[in-house]
Amino acid sequence: MKSLIAFLLLFSSLMIQANPDTFDCSVKNLLISDKTAPESFIEGNLQKRFIIAVDDDDVIVTSISDTYSSSVTKYRILSKERSTVKAIKYDRSTIQKTIMLHIENGDSTISHQGSFHANVWLLGCKKQ
């Protein structure tokens, strides 16, 4: 009986890790610092869709686009306070990437910031 209980606990723990919270997101608004950006850049970004998966340590963001190459970005969670997750992408790039996600209502922002520009996607997300 103890073996069965231990197995069930291990199995449920693995299932939780294998099934992170997942959100399907659309772009509600795009804020960009470059006022000379072409309209096609703005429209292409407004049409993007994002799938966001949150587990214990990471946030995985899949960007889906008909205009741009789709991509997957892994962010490291900095904090989980109440229902807000804050995460950052660490790499040697000159662009800092961050995400903030409100788990309960699905509001989210993704920002890309460099020394010469900033882009922020304001997302509306639904938990899957």
Image (spheres, rainbow, N blue to C red):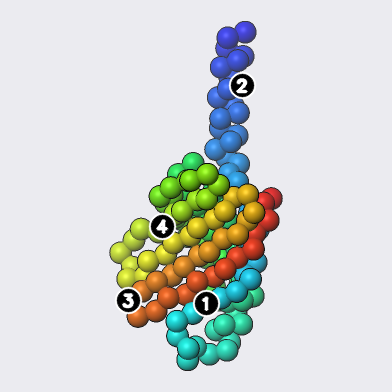
Q: Distance between the residues labelled 4 and 2?
A: 34 Å
Q: Where is residue 2 in the image (x, y as percent from the top left)?
A: 58, 9
Please name the amino acid that badge 2 sits on.
Leu
Q: Position of residue 128 (x, y in %)?
A: 69, 50
| Rendered image quadrant of residue 65 | bottom right
Of the numbered discs in the image, which one, if any, rests on residue 88? 4
Residue ID for mark 2: 8
Give the secondary structure at mark 2: helix
Residue ID for mark 1: 31
| Rendered image quadrant of residue 126 | bottom right
| Rendered image quadrant of residue 107 | bottom right
Which residue lies at the image location 60% right of the left edge and 80% below the top edge?
Answer: 44
Please name the amino acid that badge 3 sits on.
Ser
- How crowded pointer 2 is (Cα within 10 Å; few <14, some 14-19, many 20+) is rated as few
CB atoms of marks 3 and 4 within 8 Å = no
Lateral position of residue 72 relative to residue 48, left or right? left
Of the image marks 2 and 1, the number of the one nearer the N terminus: 2
- How crowded pointer 1 is (Cα within 10 Å; few <14, some 14-19, many 20+) is rated as few
